[in-house]
Image (cartoon, rainbow, N blue to C red):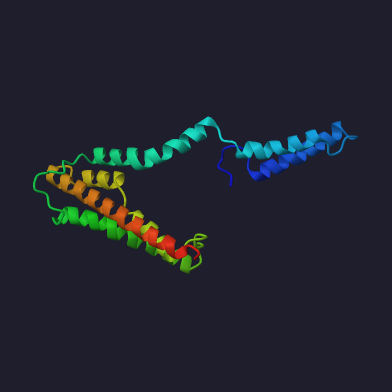
Amino acid sequence: PNTGIGPSNQDAQRWAHANDCMWDFFHPSKPGGGLKREIHALPDIFCQSRSPLERLEHGLSPWVAFLVVPIFGFANAGVALGGAGISVTDSVPLGVALGLFVGKQIGVFGAAFLLVRTRLAPMPSGANWLQLYGVAVLCGIGFTMSLFIGLLAFETSPLLIDETKIGVLVGSVLSAIVGAFILIIGGRRAAPA
C-alpha cells in the first residue's frame, strides 16, 4: 500500500517501463545485461527503504500513544482526584460517563451495522461483528470535545465543570477497558485454530 511517501507500486512499474525504453534506446545491442537488473531493482529498494524521519516516527509512536497522550488528557482535565465530595453517581458525572460509554457505542455500532446491512458500506475485510463492536466501544474514549462541551455548558458553575471532568474520565477509562477486552475476545474468535 502507498503511504503517501515515495512511489506506489504502480509508480514503480511505470518507472521500470520508462527505464526499459531508455535502456533499449541507448543500448540496443546489449539486452539483459547485469546493470539492467540493478536498475530494475532501484524502485523496489526505494519503496522498501524508510527515511530517518519515518524510523523516528515509528520508534516514538508507542511512547506518544501510551504515555504522552494520556498525560495530556489527564493534565487537560485538571481534576483533583481527591476532590470536593463529588460522587460518580451524581447526575452530571453519571450522565456524561453513560453518554460516552453507552451512547457512543450505540451510535457508532448502530450506524455501522445499518450501513453494512443495507450494503451502503462493506464490512471491513478480516473483521467480525464482535471486533466492529469493540471498536465502537473504544469510540467512547473522548477527552477533548467532551471537556470542551462541558466547559461551555457549565461555564458559570465550577462544581458542575468538575463533575463533568470526572464523568469524562470515568466514561473514557471504562470505554478503553471494555473496548480492549472485547477486541481481545474478538481477535481470538477470528484467529484460525
Q: Position of residue 174 (x, y in %)?
A: 27, 55
Evaluate whether residue 128 shows in this view. no
The outermost residue toward the right is 29
Q: In the rendered view, does 159 fall on the left or right side of 173?
A: left
Q: Nearer the viewer, residue 61 or 112?
A: 61
Q: Quadrant of residue 61?
A: top left
Q: Is residue 85 left or right of residue 70?
A: left
Task: Kindly give the residue lying farthest to the bottom in the view shown.
Answer: 117
Name the residue located 40 percent from the left edge and 41 percent from the top edge: 62
Residue 102, position in %: x, y? 28, 60
| Left or right position of 88 against 46 | left
Q: Residue at x 67, y 41 (%)?
A: 11
Taking the image as shown, residue 21 lies to the left or right of residue 138, namely right
- Who is closer to the viewer here, 79 or 52? 52
Residue 144 image-quadrant placement: top left
Percent x, y of residue 93: 18, 53
Q: Nearer the viewer, residue 149 or 87?
A: 87
Asked if one can make out residue 24 in the rendered structure from this viewpoint, the answer is yes
Residue 183 lies in quadrant:
bottom left
Residue 150 spot, x, y in % from top left: 22, 47
- Image height of 192 relative to 27, above or below: below
Furthest-front residue in this view: 193
Tell me how many marks there are.
Answer: 0
